[in-house]
Image (cartoon, helix red, strand yellow):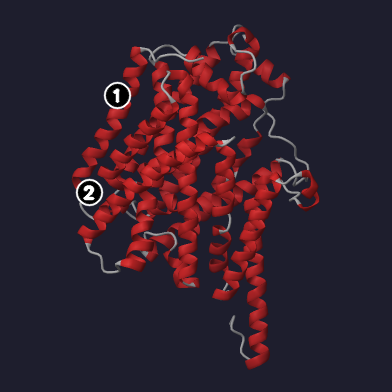
Amino acid sequence: MNKSLPILDLAVLVVYLVAMVAMGVWFGRRNKTPDQFMKAGGAIPGWAVGLSIFGTYVSSISFLALPGKAYATNWNAMVFSLAIPFAAWAAVKWYVPFYRRSGEISAYEHLEHRFGAWARTYAVLCYLLTQLGRMGAIMYLLALALQPMIGWSIPTLIVLTGVTVIIYTLIGGMEAVIWTDVVQSIVFIVGALACVAVLWLGLPQGPGQFFEIAARENKFSLGSFDLNVTQATVWVVLLNSIFINLQNFGIDQSYVQRYSTATNEREAAKSVWVGALLYVPISGVFFLIGTLLFAYYTARPELLPAGIKSDAVFPHFIATGLPVGLAGLVIASVFAAAQSTVASSINCSATLFLCDFYRRYLRPGAGDSESMTVLRVATVAFGVAGTVMGFAMMGVDSALDAWWAVASITSGGMLGLFLLGMISRAPNAAAATGTIIGVLVIVWMTISAKWPAALGQWASPFHSFMITVIGTLTILMVGLLVSRLMSSATVAATGVDSNK
């Protein structure tokens, strides 16, 4: 399947892309200071920040991969969404007040106050590497999915995504990111619901046929409830979700930076609930699309090419099963999901470069004009780097697996370090020891899955979803243990408990 995009669909897509750039130019009028560029002046209403948080959750990976998962298997991955309200509650109770009252725009500055400069720099480097991998994977997978739909080459689509996002992020800063997120969130919600309607009404025997086929094939199952950590059981996915979402809301700059854009703490808390509670049903819509696709093509198998992969079924339906015009809207929705995440990554990476590297190590007294120059240069640099990473992903066997491997190693240790600082009085040495051992465990669990059979007995027995869980707990437990041992040694030597 490879075709040129019909004129009407092309017009819808072009109008959408031009509108995004125009919004960046519009908001760029007020974008004169670092505070405005990084925090939108702290004047954004909570509902808009919430839609932006929601947009950060839903990347093109989610838009295309979740239906593919539901089509191929069941609703097991939906369990991930069920833990989000718990993480949102924790964010509202602890994270939002902590960051709002600290007045720090960087999510990692407090780590220096707690453990020293190494902790701050380690966390920032982990975040930046994670975001580069994420941007590359999203842009490449977006191009891979859209190429057969619209006939443009993969490099062209990667460059198109990178250039449009760089332009409106560079000109409009965080305010443009948030308000384009609002529009993009609405676009891909409408696009997803439109797909549900067309699939639902397109079954030969009516909507009842959907439930008949789905129930017969057990497509609504959440998976196994066995206590088995080697498989993606409900409990393993739930554990992974709790840790990942605590990490998202608690230490991910893409979320933390948005807390400071809201007008006050109450609006920031509202934004968390809006983003979290909106994602749960919308993720359900994506799984519903996958199940509807299964029923649709089970009832009409002649419409599906032989041997097509599950992840390619939804793009095939968009290209062949949607009316002209509506297909353009859905393609714009896929672009929207990608642009929302990439724009956030670029702006937040530039913010960290200014706050945690330039002002921290090079020019602590940098003024507004100099800081704006650094922010703009960093925005372009990270945007270009993310685009280059998209090209690099073309050379790997699985871009999604490559990004997951990078993310597991680079971000897996951040939550453990944060929690250690929050719930204990562990000293610098204990935190460093816990982090080193935790990262080594994470690396082992990540790379041992690819070891040759001869080394199989030394491979991790856990499912990959347990990497972040075990890595976080290792850092936390080792840090607490070393802290206790150091305290006991101090008591033995001086009679003073350093933990009191």
User: Can you say whether 221 is above or below 39 in the image?
Assistant: above
Residue corresponding to mark 2: 31
Is 304 left, or right, of 251 in this rendering? right
Q: Residue furthest bottom?
A: 494
Is 248 left, or right, of 499 in this rendering? left
Residue at 49% x, 27% y is 144
* Residue 252 in view: no
438 or 397: which is nearer to us?
A: 397
Q: Earlier in the sequence, mark 1 or mark 2?
A: 1
Residue at 42% x, 19% y is 150
Q: Please state the total of marks drawn on the protein image.
A: 2
165 or 82: which is nearer to us?
A: 165
Residue corresponding to mark 1: 15
Which of the numbered marks, if any, corresponds to residue 46?
none
Q: Residue 90 in the image: x percent, y percent?
A: 53, 55
* Residue 343 in view: yes
Is 252 left, or right, of 44 in this rendering? right
Residue type at the position of mark 2: Asn
Residue type at the position of mark 1: Val
Classify mark 2: helix, strand or loop. loop
